Amino acid sequence: MSGIAGMQGEICGDVHVLPLVVYWEDTDGGGIVYFANYLKFCERGRSDLLRGLGIDQREMLERTGLALVVRDCAIEYLKPARLDDGIAVHSRVLEVGGATVRAEQIVRRGAEELVRSQVRIACVDRGGRPRRLPDAIRDGLSGLMQPKRVGTA
């Protein structure tokens, strides 16, 4: 898929993968990633997934007055990342609704899961009121979802 300028990572099937390196600024005094920084890593992953689909959030805000904001987030910390670790944020769209998108994001070091999160993103206007997702965003994100199989567990 062709993205807009500045996209990092790549879209592989239904997952966007953003490789990162843990810098000193990401860690606490013990050299372990400070818990809130995983939220920043995940935000970067979601932003670059959108860029990979050709969606420019700044242009969307300027042109339409619409923004994508975090409505809610659940995060589970499984294992710590440390200074200089190579990690990757794996972002996958789970559900696209009228005004919201639900995604799963997993931070990995190689095959090892470090953090697992689910986030719901809402489309809002400048006043913070919910608005329907623009068709281009809904179509782009829906195209990343794996088809649901009927009758499987």
Image: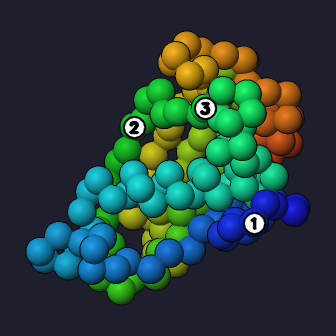
Residue that badge 2 annotates: 74
Q: Earlier in the sequence, mark 3 or mark 2?
A: 3
Identify the image quadrant of residue 60.
top right
Q: Position of residue 49 (x, y in %)?
A: 68, 54
Q: Amino acid at mark 2?
A: Ala
Which residue is painted at 53% across and 58% down in the image? 44
Which residue is painted at 30% across and 70% down in the image? 26
Q: Amino acid at mark 3?
A: Ala
Rendered-image quadrant of the N terminus: bottom right
Q: Indicate left or right for 10 with 33 as reference.
A: right
Mark 3: few/some/many CA within 10 Å (<14, 14-19, 20+): many
Separation of residues labelled 1 and 2 (CA atoms): 30 Å
Tags 1 and 2 touching, CB below 8 Å = no
Which residue is painted at 51% across and 18% down in the image? 128
Rendered-image quadrant of the C terminus: top right
Q: Indicate left or right for 151 with 115 as reference.
A: right
Residue that badge 1 annotates: 5
Separation of residues labelled 3 and 1 (CA atoms): 19 Å
Tags 3 and 2 touching, CB below 8 Å = no
Q: Position of residue 40 (x, y in %)?
A: 41, 56
Q: Amino acid at mark 1?
A: Ala
Q: Secondary structure at mark 2?
A: strand
Q: Secondary structure at mark 1?
A: loop
Label count reads 3
Residue 89 shows up from this direction? yes
Identify the image quadrant of residue 78.
bottom left
Mark sitting on residue 67: 3
Closer to the camera, 94 or 24?
Answer: 24
Position of residue 103 relative to residue 48, above or below, is above
Q: Position of residue 99 (x, y in %)?
A: 67, 20
Q: Residue furthest top?
A: 129
Separation of residues labelled 3 and 2 (CA atoms): 21 Å
